[in-house]
């Protein structure tokens, strides 16, 4: 799984911007990149047309006789 720095640098390279070299919490370039990442990642995840788990179905509780361990009451 890509780390945050790799994702940020992929986005920067696609927009023609300079890459962030290292995750330094006190550098100006890292602060700007981190704020943009934190702001846009949830929006991009929500906007993506996920094509799995599109159907839901209600489940019913098993009778006690079929659930001898009572682990999942």
Image (cartoon, grey):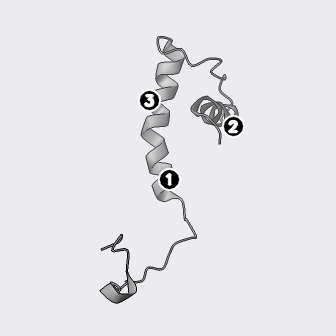
* Numbered circle sitting on residue 45: 1
Q: CA distance from mark 1 to mark 3?
A: 16 Å
Q: Earlier in the sequence, mark 1 or mark 3?
A: 3
**Up/down of 20 relative to 53, above or below:** above
**Up/down of 20 relative to 42, above or below:** above
- Identify the residue at the far front of this view: 68
Q: What secondary structure is found at the residue carrying circle 3?
A: helix
Q: Position of residue 29 (x, y in %)?
A: 53, 17
Image quarter of the C terminus:
bottom left
Q: What secondary structure is found at the residue carrying circle 2?
A: helix
Q: Nearer the viewer, residue 54 or 18?
A: 54
Choose mark 1 or mark 2, whichever is in front.
1
Q: Nearer the viewer, residue 65 or 46?
A: 65
* Numbered circle sitting on residue 22: none
Q: Position of residue 1 (x, y in %)?
A: 65, 42
- Badge 1 density bin: few <14, some 14–19, many ≥20, Cα 10 Å: few
Q: Nearer the viewer, residue 12 or 59?
A: 59
State if disc 3 and disc 1 touch (CB < 8 Å): no
Q: Position of residue 63 (x, y in %)?
A: 32, 88
* Numbered circle sitting on residue 35: 3
Q: Quadrant of residue 70?
A: bottom left
* Numbered circle sitting on residue 14: 2
At 51% from the left edge and 12% from the top edge, which residue is drawn?
A: 27
Q: Position of residue 67 (x, y in %)?
A: 37, 81
């Amino acid at each position: 799984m890509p780390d945050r720095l790799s994702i940020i640098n992929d986005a920067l390279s696609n927009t023609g911007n300079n890459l962030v070299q290292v995750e330094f919490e006190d550098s100006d370039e890292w602060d700007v990149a981190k704020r943009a990442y934190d702001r846009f990642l949830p929006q991009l995840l929500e906007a993506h047309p996920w094509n799995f788990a599109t159907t839901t179905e209600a489940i019913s509780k098993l009778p006690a006789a079929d659930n001898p361990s009572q682990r999942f009451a």
